[in-house]
Amino acid sequence: MMKTWLAAGAGALTVGMSTTVLAGPVTQPGEQVGLAYGPLPQGVYAINTFSTGRGDARNSPDVGVNVPILVWSTGYKVLGATIMPVIAVPSVFVGTNNPAGVANQDQSYFYNPFIGNIFAWDLGNKISAAYLVGAYVGVGDRGSLCNGAPGAACIAGGATPVLPQVAGTSIRNTGGISYTGEGWNLTAALTHILQVDDAPRFGGQVGAALGPIPNSDGLYIDLTATKTFGKFEIGAVAYGYTDLPVNRNRAIYANYQKQGTFAAGGLIGYDFGIFKTQLMVTRTVADRGVGPFADETRGWVRFIAPLYTTAAAAVAAPTPLVRKY
């Protein structure tokens, strides 16, 4: 049976497409729900989370996000915490639903890769905690939509940035705590994203046309409450995101509009032994501002598998203190 201790790795983003000045979230809101925080047995683990959704607003795009993660539980410890390096290379898929007369475009982009480390503690009594720190390195695709106008016409007409977050590097800090006794997974995780440059710029001609991209720091919360019955898992999940205040005295933020969302839904999972899968459906229950979060329904599927684990060492038979000859 697969262990249920699963430390959240890294995420991608939800795409923002609007002429309003917005700062999209760096890590996808909700990408940690369903996971528990804590030390993994020594080995290498793969976690892949795919989600797709579309806002209710007319002409909202279909947005898919795939987050493949590798976690290496080294077995080494520092200050009592298991050291677990993590890497992720997320990707984003966008299918437009433009009004009549405007050509649709299906596009895909690699997001900035994430490199970091998880420090995981077993606190006893089925309670554990972890701290994830790392960076989304700003080397991803620039990402822009041209509304059907390719090449020079796109630049002249003004490209729309699909992935404004990709323009720069950002630092991620996540703290989480879990209770996993008696088949429960009760987990809360809080994430803070710090922009290294709050006004980065894409390279090349498109970057010159777009100019600096306003990005804000962000705060995320992910909540999980599930119960395992044999090989089945069922429960509820919820997540929220808000961007943090920006400097309104800077011209780049003159038309900036704050964003935020809170969504909730259900989870069902099954443990196949060699891997575990989870299915979720979430629905926005509150939102602020415009963009991709307004009244969105999103479906999720996750696969979790150990690629390599170290077999437990055989326990030697105790040697008697007194022998008879």
Image (cartoon, grey):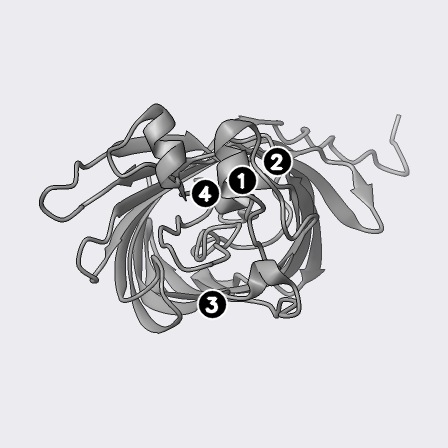
Q: Given contact means CB atoms under 8 Å apart, are the residues at marks 4 and 3 in contact?
A: no
Q: Amino acid at mark 3?
A: Gln
Q: Amino acid at mark 4?
A: Leu
Q: Is residue 288 left or right of residue 325?
A: left
Q: Given contact means CB atoms under 8 Å apart, are the residues at marks 2 and 3 in contact?
A: no
Q: Gap between marks 1 and 2, in whole Å?
A: 6 Å
> Label 2: which residue?
138
Q: Amino acid at mark 1?
A: Val
Q: Residue at x 72, y 35 (%)?
A: 75
Q: If you read the primary sequence from the N terminus, does the residue marked by circle 4 or circle 2 appear first?
A: 2
Q: Which mark is residue 166?
A: 1
Please say whether residue 178 is visible from this viewpoint: no
Q: Which mark is residue 163?
A: 4
Q: Given contact means CB atoms under 8 Å apart, are the residues at marks 4 and 1 in contact?
A: yes
User: Under tag 3, what secondary structure?
Assistant: loop
**Picture coordinates of residue 128 (x, y %)?**
64, 59
> Label 3: which residue?
257
Q: Gap between marks 2 and 3, in whole Å?
A: 24 Å
Q: Badge 1, how many Cα within 10 Å: few under 14, some, many 20+?
A: many
**Picture coordinates of residue 245 (x, y %)?**
61, 70
Q: Is residue 177 left or right of residue 324?
A: left
Q: Residue at x 27, y 39 (%)?
A: 147
